[in-house]
Structures are given as structure tokens and as C-alpha cells.
Amino acid sequence: MNQINTTIPQAPAASAPTASAPVAAAPSHGALADPGSLGLAAFALTTFVLSMSNTGIVPSSAAVLGLALFYGGIAQVLAGLWEFYNRNTFGATAFTSFGAFWLSFWYLESTGGNVEAGAAGMGTFLLAWTIFTLYMTVAAKKTNGSIFAVFVALTITFLFLAIGAYTGITAIHQLGGWFGILTALLAWYGSFAVVFNSTAGRAVLPVWPSK
């Protein structure tokens, strides 16, 4: 896959010095671990905990706040910045954006901004994320089947949550929660595949790379 690798990344070749410039060529960085495993894990775990609340299984979403700030938020943003360093446009955009989503979620929940925004405000917030996730899903087709499945499920999750927020219909909101759980499980598999394949030094768990 051209975005989130399942093998140990190789060090890029150092740039050759120019014939006339006295300045030494910029040093290349060494081999870096794939941040995809961290980004997917942070996204999966935080999504799972919130989705358990959205389904109604867990009566309160308070338990997700710490995760939204530190794991789904900060850790995922760091994974995204690492992807920028790895020149992975898709991974950088996805992880940094969804890390920012969790940070904004934490802020809204912690300050009461979600209540002040009301149904229309939160519905629009979720609709905007639906649109972003939808076009990222189109791009995800060029990565691998595992990542594509995550984005398909996440798009559906955001859509149901947006409709639920606009209409106030609990059943639709809860349906979004169930799709959120599915999204989390798919993301956990993607994270596990990156960790296991990288540790094994070969592709063991399939991720179905795009052809």
C-alpha cells in the first residue's frame, strides 16, 4: 500500500551533493517506525469507548474525555506529524485531522459547548466531518482494503450521528454508535496488522493492498 505500510520502512537514500556547492548535502533521516499502528490504535480505542456510550450500552460518555484529549487527540496528531515527516500525505492528513477531531470533541464536551451549539450546531459539526471522511474514503481506495473498510464504516458512522443530532431521534444516534463500534474493530485490526507484520519482518496478516 502506498500510504500505511505493513513492512519495516527503509531508510531513504541520501541526496547527492552538487558539484559546485561547498555546502554539504542535507543528511537523510534513518529508518523510522510506521506511525500507522499508533494512529489507528489511538483512533480505534477512543472511538470504541465513545461508541459504547452512543449505543446506550454505557450511560455516560464521561469516560472518553481523557482518551479524547491524550490518546485519540494528542497521540494521533503526533502520528500524523510523523506521517508528514515520512512524506505520507494520506496518513498525515487522516491522523492529524482525526486527532484534531478528538481534541475538538474534548473541548466541546468539557466546556459545555455541545449544549450551547444545540442540535443544529452539533449536527452541522458532524455533517462537516462526514463530508471530510467521505472524500478521504475515495482516496483510501488507493491504500489497502483494511484502511478502505475503516473509512467506509466511519463515513456511515458520522452520517448516522449527524442525522441523529439534527433530528433528535435516539434510534438513529444509537445506530451510529453501532457503526462506530464496527469502525473501531476494523481500525484495531489495521493497527494489529501493522504491528505484527512489522515485528515479524514480513507480511503475515493481510491488509489487501490496492493494485
Image (cartoon, rainbow, N blue to C red):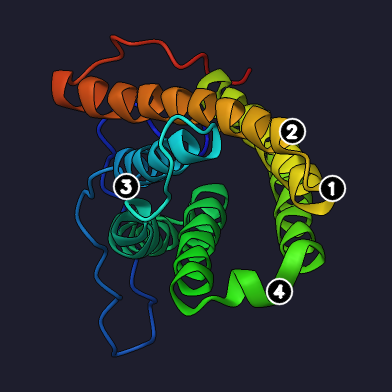
- Please name the residue shown 30% across and 75% down the image: 26
Circle 1 residues within 10 Å: few <14, some 14–19, many ≥20? some
> In whole angstroms, how far apart are the C-alphas of marks 4 and 2?
20 Å
Q: Above or below — where is 61 with respect to 142? A: below
Please name whichever residue, 10 or 59, is drawn nearer the observer in this view of the structure.
59
Q: CA distance from mark 1 to mark 3?
A: 38 Å
Q: Are marks 1 and 2 in contact (CB under 8 Å)?
A: yes
Q: CA distance from mark 4 to mark 1?
A: 14 Å
Q: Which residue is mark 3?
A: 35
Q: Which residue is mark 2?
A: 172
What count of labels does the image hold? 4
Residue at image mark 1: 167
**Could you say where residue 37 lies in the image, as x and y percent from the top left?**
31, 38
Label 3 sits on a secondary structure element that is loop
The x, y position of residue 191, in whole percent, is: 34, 31
**SS class of the residue under badge 1?**
helix
Of the numbered discs 3 and 4, the one sitting upstream in the chain is 3
Front of the two marks 1 and 3: 1
* Mark 3 → mark 4, Cα distance in angstroms: 34 Å
Q: Earlier in the sequence, mark 1 or mark 3?
A: 3
Q: Is residue 52 visible?
A: yes
Q: Nearer the viewer, residue 104 or 29?
A: 104
Q: Quadrant of the C terminus?
A: top right
Q: Looking at the image, is 152 positioned above or below residue 87?
A: above
* Residue placed under numbered mark 4 in the picture: 117
Marks 1 and 2, how far apart at CA: 9 Å
**Does 164 sit left or right of 103 as displayed?**
right
The amino acid beneath tag 2 is Ile
Of the image marks 4 and 1, the number of the one nearer the N terminus: 4
Above or below, comparing residue 81 to residue 181 in the picture: below
